[in-house]
């Protein structure tokens, strides 16, 4: 009986997934996605040299080393960037995909949630951005039970314009993001999985 207990304990230990194991799986999932999608990763220096743009035709994503977030600017958007000291309402359409499973987790671009545009208030304080989802007006808020906006969602804000379409030929800002769990929503953070986001930004009516 003692041998059986010891064997069971050792087996359980071998199959216990540590935080380090989960981070390794997360990293592998990101690398696999980059490879499968043919993504060209550029540095922050290259991003700056290119005028803070990413070449969509080359499927470029810039890697922000400090956060581990990858970003592609699909469209810079119309209007103006959020100014220093300004607080604005930002409307978001998004699709969230778990890169460990390849499954779409959440989206307000599908019929079920098509009537809901996620709303968040965003403040720019000397180039540092903070944001909160508005209760009752956010699929992210109702799903994850928190007003906290994933840090990864804030990464594009210094580089895109947050406006409203006022004339033909204009379009709102759109980005694609690869967000590690440390910069993600609460479930991703606790369960350690990376997400891909297709995300648009539009200025709300004040």
Image (cartoon, rainbow, N blue to C red):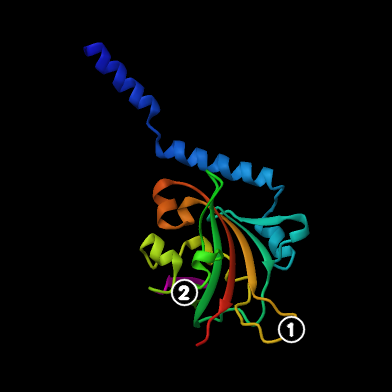
Q: How crowded is mark 2: few (under 14 residues within 10 Å), some or many (20 or more)?
A: many
Q: Is residue 114 above or below residue 18?
A: below
Tell me which corner region of the image, top left, top right, bottom left or bottom right, holds residue 61. bottom right
45 or 191, which is in the foreground? 191
Q: In this view, does 145 lie above or below 122?
A: above
Residue to which mark 1 is pinned? 168
Residue tagged 2? 120
Where residue 81 appears, as percent x and y from the top left, is 61, 78
Where is residue 109 drawn, in percent x and y? 56, 65
Boundaries of the magenta span: 128-134
Residue 109: which disc? none
Q: Position of residue 145 (x, y in %)?
A: 36, 63
Task: Indicate which label's residue lies in the foreground, 2 or 1.
Answer: 1
Nearer to us in this view, 103 or 8 = 103
Asked if 107 appears above or below 36 in the picture, the reply is: below
Residue 59 inside the magenta-drawn segment: no
Q: Name the residue at 51% across, 73% down.
A: 115
| Above or below: residue 95 compared with residue 87 | above
| The N terminus: image quadrant | top left
């Amino acid at each position: 009986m003692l041998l059986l207990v010891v064997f069971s304990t050792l087996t359980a230990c071998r199959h216990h997934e540590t935080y380090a194991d989960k981070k390794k799986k997360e990293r592998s999932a990101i690398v696999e996605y980059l490879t499968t999608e043919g993504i060209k990763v550029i540095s922050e220096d290259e991003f700056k040299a290119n005028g803070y743009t990413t070449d969509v035709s080359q499927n470029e994503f810039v890697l922000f080393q400090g956060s581990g977030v990858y970003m592609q600017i699909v469209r810079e958007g119309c209007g103006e960037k959020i100014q220093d000291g300004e607080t604005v309402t930002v409307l978001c359409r998004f699709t969230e995909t778990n890169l460990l499973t390849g499954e779409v987790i959440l989206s307000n671009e599908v019929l079920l949630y098509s009537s809901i545009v996620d709303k968040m208030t965003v403040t720019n304080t000397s180039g540092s951005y903070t944001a909160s989802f508005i209760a009752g007006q956010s699929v992210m808020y109702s799903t994850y039970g928190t007003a906290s906006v994933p840090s990864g969602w804030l990464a594009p804000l210094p580089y895109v314009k947050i406006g409203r379409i006022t004339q033909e030929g204009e379009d709102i800002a759109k980005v694609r993001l690869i967000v590690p769990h440390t910069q993600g929503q609460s479930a991703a953070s606790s369960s350690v999985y990376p997400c891909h986001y297709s995300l648009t930004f539009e200025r709300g009516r004040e």
